[in-house]
Amino acid sequence: MRVQLLPSTFDGSRASLRQHLTCFVIDDSVAIDAGSLAMSASREQQSAIRDIVVTHAHLDHIAGLPLFIDDLFSSLTEPVTVHATRPVIETLERDIFNWSVYPRFSELSNSNGPVLRYETFGQAEEFTVKHLTFRAVEVNHRVPSSGFIISDTKSTIAMSGDTSGTDGFWNLINSADQISAILLECAFPDELNELADVSHHLTPKRMVVELEKCERDCPVFVVNLKPMYRDEIVEQIRQMKLKHVEILEVGKVYNW
Ligand SMILES: [Zn+2]
């Protein structure tokens, strides 16, 4: 399974490590979240991606979604399918695709047919997107949010999405047949523990508490570092000398 975290900021023409927006692309064909999808997907990815699985409706995870559909509007030969829970779809329709912020693409068609459709999944459900099998689990964020275990025929990875302390995600990981990699969020440095608490995110210390729930020996890649605190978070994680834990590299293609 090829997994890439798309960049969201640039220094000149070079991708920067500062990650304002979240969008993972699997096998160049399925997106998890769409934060930087319109801005950073390659031409090949743009023409192949027609399925987007959304963890939750916060802006940094969906900012590129309206723009992505807008860009492709006249060329789509099949609709873009957004896979999300019912509350996330309701938020997208009410607050984004509401004719005020952006057109309601779910009511629009081009000459080939509809341009946007929704597929609903429930928490604890298994569903298929292209060649991938997803198992969703509710995580602990300020809004309805999902983590996932994602499998192809060879490997399985886990993605926490945005979350604070949670048991369900780890129970799912511990009960899976095999896990090749875990992508775990860590948004704030330790001194912003209070902010992490009210916004339902992790800090390095909180992350360690979470990792104690993990019965797997696989690598853990830290994601969702708030760009203003990135250096601090990285340093705090380094000082902890945690086995198997590293920071996911923005833009790099991982093969698991
Ligand atoms: Zn969030």
Image (tube, rainbow, N blue to C red):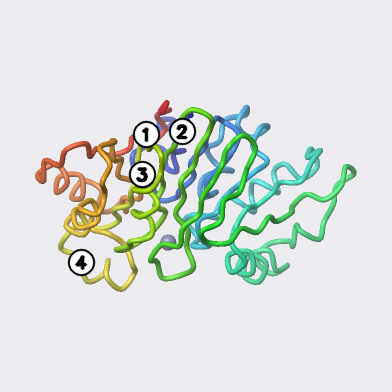
Q: Residues within 10 Å of mark 1 (few under 14, many from 20)?
A: some
Mark in front: 1 vs 3: 1
For label 2, the residue is 3
Left or right: residue 124 versus residue 90 is left
Disc number placed over residue 183 in the picture, else none: 3
For label 4, the residue is 193
Up-down: is 107 above or below 131?
A: below
Which amino acid, mark 1? Ser
Which residue is at a point 41% across and 38% down the rendered structure image? 10
Label 1 residue SS: loop
Q: Residues within 10 Å of mark 2 (few under 14, many from 20)?
A: some
Which amino acid, mark 4? Asn
Disc number placed over residue 232 in the picture, else none: none
Mark in front: 2 vs 4: 2
Earlier residue among tags 2 and 3:
2
Left or right: residue 224 versus residue 35 is left
For label 1, the residue is 180
Mark in front: 1 vs 4: 1
Which residue is at a point 28% across and 36% down the rendered structure image? 219
Label 4 residue SS: helix
Give the image location of residue 176, x and y in percent: 40, 44
